[in-house]
Every structure is written in structure tokens, then in C-alpha cells.
Amino acid sequence: MAEILQKVVDESKQGEAFAPFAEDPNQYSKKFYIESYGCQMNFSDSEIVASILQEEGFGATRNYEDASLVLINTCSIREKAEQTVRNRLQAFRKIKEQRPGMLIGVLGCMAERLKAKFLEEEKLVDIVVGPDAYRSLPGLITEAEGGQKTVNVLLSREETYADIAPVRLDSNGVTAFVSIMRGCNNMCSFCVVPFTRGRERSRDAASIVNECRDLFERGFREVTLLGQNVDSYHYSPLATTAANEAVTFARLLEMVAQVSPLLRVRFSTSHPKDITDDVLHTMAAYHNICRYIHLPVQSGNTRVLQAMNRTYTREWYLSKVQRIREIMPDCGLSTDVISGFCTETEEEHADTLSLMELCRFDMAYMFSYSERPGTLAARRFTDDVPENVKKRRLEEIIRLQNGHSLESYKNDIGKTFEVLIEGDSRRSDADWCGRNSQNKMVVFPKGTQDLKKGDYVQVKINSATSATLIGEMI
């Protein structure tokens, strides 16, 4: 999934912190504050946590100094992300010294790996909870209020939180994340996710469709189906019959698209080895399934891909991109790229650059390799590419992608797109902003039309930057 990494910035980029709100904060006797770091799954999980806490009488607040419970939902994808979290915990700890009753908790991917450090060595937190243990939060809070340090980082093969209605945090009322599965079975050698989030399990398809329908009825007009690898979604009812068949990801996409033609459907993230023609043909068949795929490549060299345990070759990836564009010529495409993975040579780095030239991604999340303790790469390989070389290779990747992004956006000048209005432009409340089907941000003047968030409009593009299309309604 796309993490807090160096990337091409667009109009809608979220910050690292994610502070929720309560519609009526005064109705709750206790307040909680939560920040989320990392992938969209973490942001989605924070909405589940908010729902659990609200049932226990906690109301959300934007100001952590007002909170009796402060939580950080953490990411372990890179050392920089972990250091950011540590710095925040230290800041919260100083506030706690002035407010002894305040509790500090760590959620998410750092919880299992660093529980001992947080609880015992550095004494930064009172509560540590892993991604599969959020239902235990109320009990852990009660114990912590009594002076005990509490922890639950047990992983589950069944937990999907399918029965919990997420509290939409900092929502624009138009777009929402919907988790369809948890965990990951792909043992990419650089990735810590299988160890922090456990094995794959797919959520009940009916509960997903019901959540999407409820969101639509409440005025939301776009859902993003989330999973570490959505293409491997597969839900099998206990009693499979002709009327109660197993649901693949392609079938799930269709079921959600059929909620309403006015409900846009996106998804993230796809694994190149698993995305099928069935998925592509389903996307092509429904106007409201967005023409956009995030397809992480990580490296353009087959030997490095094998060392990463990505289970595909350079040629396989290129053929998959070609297939996507055969079925959907207008499909937007983004990717993830890692520079300086263990043993990567200059020639192999050049292969990544050449693959980028061939694919011409609209956008990319780009970062240098950061060894994560406990991963297969940490056990098997030496992190032997010097930091200055990693940095230089990353700069070359970013420079190339910036050029491709600018080219891609400028190619849209003169075209007309259907845009879903998400709200005011960040730069001016005289302009609307929203995305087209290809996930590109579009900014345009409000004019005199009586429009609102959640409306669809046709926008002709007049100019572009490397991250934003600028146009006018027609």
C-alpha cells in the first residue's frame, strides 16, 4: 500500500497526522485524540477504533491537550516513520507529566515489534494494541486507568471487524475507505506487513456491499475498497450454493458498482501477479468503476525482483501493463519504486529507470530501501548499498517520474472529464477541487452554478502542473 514516503504531491495530499472530530464533543464525558501514520489501512483502522471508543462513551477531539486518551496508529514501513512516531510519543509524554491521568496508547504495526521498548525501556506509553486486537481496547483502558501497563498484540486468522460501523473521521462527506480484507500472504522480503498484520482473510461480501450502500444513502459518492492485496480477495460462505457462491474480487467490484451508478468505486492496492483479466473487464464494463490502478513494481530488474520475492519478472510486469492498456486505454496507472535494495547494481538501477520510461506512470510513490528488523531481507541479505548511493538513485527516479507526471498531465489539456466535487480547493475557496476517473486532481472556478460537494460536473482542462489539472466547467 502507498505509505508516508517521498512522492509526487497533489492537491489532496493528506498530512501524517489524522485528528478526528466529534459532531457534538460535549455529549461525551471522556475525550480521545488519535493520529494515524502510514497506509490507508491505518486510517481505516482508526475509524474502527473510533467506533469502538464511541460505544464506550469517548468523544473525539482535535486537541490532544483536551484528551484523556491519546492514541497513535503507527507504521513500520520505514525507519523515518518510526522515528516520527517516537518523537510524537515523547512530546505527548511531556504533556502527560502535567496531566497524570492522561493515557497514551500505541496502535498498529509498530505495536508488536516495539512493545517492550515502548512499555518498559522508554516508558513512553500505557497501552499497546496490535491491528487485530482493537476490540480489547475498552478492557485495556480500564486496566491502564488502574495503573497497569497493558498490551494485546495477538494476531488473528478470523478478525475482519465486519460488524463494526466505522466512524468517519475528518470526512469530507464525499469519499470514504471501506476495508475488504486484512493481512497479507505475500512474503515480500523487504516488507514487515505479514508479521504485523498476519495472514490474509477476506471480509463477508454482503457486509461490504451493505456498508457501501449505507455510505451512498448518507450522501457519500465514492468508496475506495482497501486491502494489502485486493486482487486476492476471496470470500467463501460456509454453505456454498448456486445462490450463495464464492465471491472473487472481480465479482465484489461488480456488486459494489451495482449499488448505484452515482457511486464511484476505487480500490487499492493491486499485486501484479494477481490482478486478472476478469477484474480489468469488470472495470471496463462499469462507468462508475474508476479507470485507475495502483500497481507497485518496486524494481525494474528481474534479479532484484526475485531477491524481493515479488514472484514476477520485469517482462511479466510489462505485459501486465500492456494488458491493462489494451482493455482500458484511458486507465490511469501509478506505482511504487524502491531504490538501493540489497545488492542492487548500477545496471539494475538503470533497468528500473528504463521500465519507468516504458510504462510512463502518471504518479509514483518513491523511496529508498530501509531495512526493517524481522523481515526476510534483514535475515538473508546485507544492506550493502551506501546511503549516498541510495539517495542519488532515488533522486534520479524522482526526477524522471516528475517529468513523466508533467507529461501525463499536460497530455490532458483540451480534454473534458467528469469530476466528482470533493470540496474547496486548498488554495482558494473560489475554486472547487475533485478527481477524475483516472485519480487526477482537477481544480476549477466555482462560477455561478448552484453546486455542492458530491456533485458530478464536466470540466474541460486548460492547463496543468505535474500534479493538478486546471480547467473550467462546461
Image (cartoon, rainbow, N blue to C red):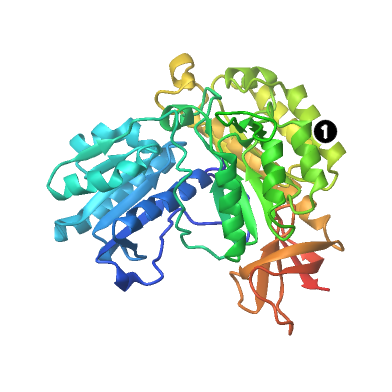
Q: Nearer the viewer, residue 290 or 352?
A: 290
Considering the numbered disc 1 on the image, is that residue within a helix, a strand or a loop? helix
Say if 371 sits above or below 295 in the image.
above
Q: Splitting the image into 4 quarters, where does residue 203 fall?
A: top right
Q: Is residue 12 visible?
A: no
Residue 328 spot, x, y in % from top left: 83, 43
Q: Residue at x 68, y 54 (%)?
A: 259
Q: Nearer the viewer, residue 422 or 405?
A: 422
Mark 1: which amino acid?
A: Arg
* Mark 1 Cα shell of 10 Å, populated few (<14), some (14-19), many (≥20): some
Residue 366 spot, x, y in % from top left: 60, 40
Residue 160 spot, x, y in % from top left: 47, 38
Q: Is residue 80 visible?
A: yes
Q: Nearer the viewer, residue 29 or 357?
A: 29
Residue 428 spot, x, y in % from top left: 61, 75
Mark 1 highlights which residue?
323
Q: Is residue 421 left or right of residue 307?
A: right
The quadrant of the picture occupied by the N terminus is top right
Q: Splitting the image into 4 quarters, where does residue 98 fall?
A: bottom left
Q: Is residue 433 left or right of residue 81?
A: right
Q: Residue at x 29, y 60 (%)?
A: 57
Q: Is residue 136 left or right of residue 230?
A: left
Q: How many marks?
A: 1
Q: Nearer the viewer, residue 78 or 48?
A: 48
The quadrant of the picture occupied by the C terminus is bottom right
Q: Residue at x 70, y 64 (%)?
A: 420
Q: Residue furthest bottom?
A: 448
Say if 406 sits above or below 217 in the image.
above
Q: Residue furthest top?
A: 380
Q: Is residue 156 left or right of residue 423?
A: left
